Image (cartoon, rainbow, N blue to C red):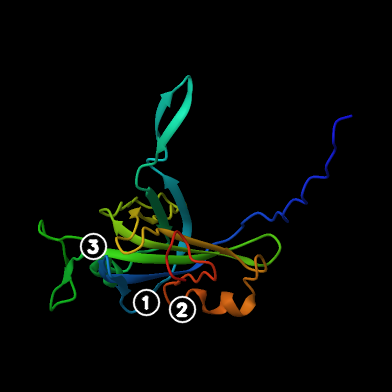
């Protein structure tokens, strides 16, 4: 007779329904010896965020009539944020533009956007939150939308920023994700998760590293 086993219980499921508390931190250094970040900046007005892998397909080598060696490319994500507004001071920061003495934002051909860590949280249907950090992102030029008012009809114009998220040089990490109330990630850990760029700890060394 075939052996029957009881499947492991499924984890609790709760869909995400919100987005808030978006923060960014400038990446100051990222070398083989470590990564450092600057002061966190809150970005208000977050409406939508989407994270999409761009190059997830592996290079597969077949031999002996079967799938053999598999090489995965370095992770690269497209990260898009939609905001109610993108203040000029935030644009100056993420796009490396300059605000002149008269308070006017000036964009120049030599502007070179720097790298940032980006964090936010998303409310779940159970009232708890999912927390996200992307460790190394770079903003693409902002998409600006403007439209005339049509009588009593007003179309809201929102700002969209597209980011490219890649791995860090120091350790290859590119994203951290936590669900409140799961895997020991409690309310205390959640309260501090977006106050600094998250640093993971492992009791058992990961890939030969120290925790």
Q: Quadrant of residue 116?
A: bottom left
Q: Look at discs 3 and 2 and give the one toward the viewer.
A: 2
- The quarter of the picture where the N terminus appears is top right
Q: What residue is rendered at 77% in x and 49% in y?
A: 8
Q: Look at discs 1 and 3 and give the one toward the viewer.
A: 1
In this rendering, the answer to whether 67 lies above or below 116 is above
* 24 and 141: which is toward the camera: 24
Please name the residue that numbered disc 3 is placed on. Answer: 95
Q: What residue is rendered at 42% in x and 25% in y?
A: 62
Indicate which disc, 1 or 3, sits on the residue closer to the N terminus.
1
Indicate which disc, 2 or 1, sits on the residue closer to the N terminus.
1
Q: What residue is rendered at 19% in x and 75% in y?
A: 103
Please name the residue that numbered disc 1 is placed on. Answer: 40
* 64 and 167: which is toward the camera: 64
Q: Secondary structure at mark 1?
A: loop
Percent position (x, y) of residue 72? Answer: 39, 41
* 51 and 172: which is toward the camera: 172
Marks 2 and 1 close (CB-CB < 8 Å) = yes
Percent position (x, y) of residue 139? Answer: 29, 57
Percent position (x, y) of residue 19? Answer: 53, 62
Point out the residue furthest to the right here. 1
Marks counted in the figure total 3
Please name the residue that numbered disc 2 is placed on. Answer: 195
Percent position (x, y) of residue 210? Answer: 43, 70
Q: Is residue 81 left or right of residue 126?
A: left
């Amino acid at each position: 007779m075939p052996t029957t086993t009881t499947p492991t219980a499924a984890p609790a499921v709760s869909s995400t329904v919100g987005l808030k508390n978006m923060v960014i931190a400038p990446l100051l250094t990222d070398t083989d010896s470590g990564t450092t970040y600057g002061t966190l900046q809150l970005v208000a007005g977050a409406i939508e965020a989407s994270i999409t892998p761009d190059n997830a397909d592996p290079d597969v080598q077949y031999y002996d009539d079967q799938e053999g060696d598999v090489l995965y490319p370095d992770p690269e994500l497209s990260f898009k944020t939609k905001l109610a507004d993108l203040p000029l001071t935030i644009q100056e920061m993420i796009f490396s533009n300059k605000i002149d003495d008269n308070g006017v934002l000036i964009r120049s051909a030599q502007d070179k956007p720097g790298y940032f860590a980006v964090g936010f949280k998303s409310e779940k249907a159970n009232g708890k939150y999912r927390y996200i950090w992307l460790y190394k992102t770079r903003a693409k030029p902002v998409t600006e939308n403007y439209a005339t008012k049509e009588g009593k009809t007003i179309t809201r114009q929102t700002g969209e920023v597209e980011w490219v998220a890649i791995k860090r040089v120091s350790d290859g990490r590119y994203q951290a994700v936590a669900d409140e109330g799961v895997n020991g990630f409690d309310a205390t850990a959640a309260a501090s998760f977006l106050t600094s760029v998250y640093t993971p700890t492992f009791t058992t060394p990961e890939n030969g590293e120290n925790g």
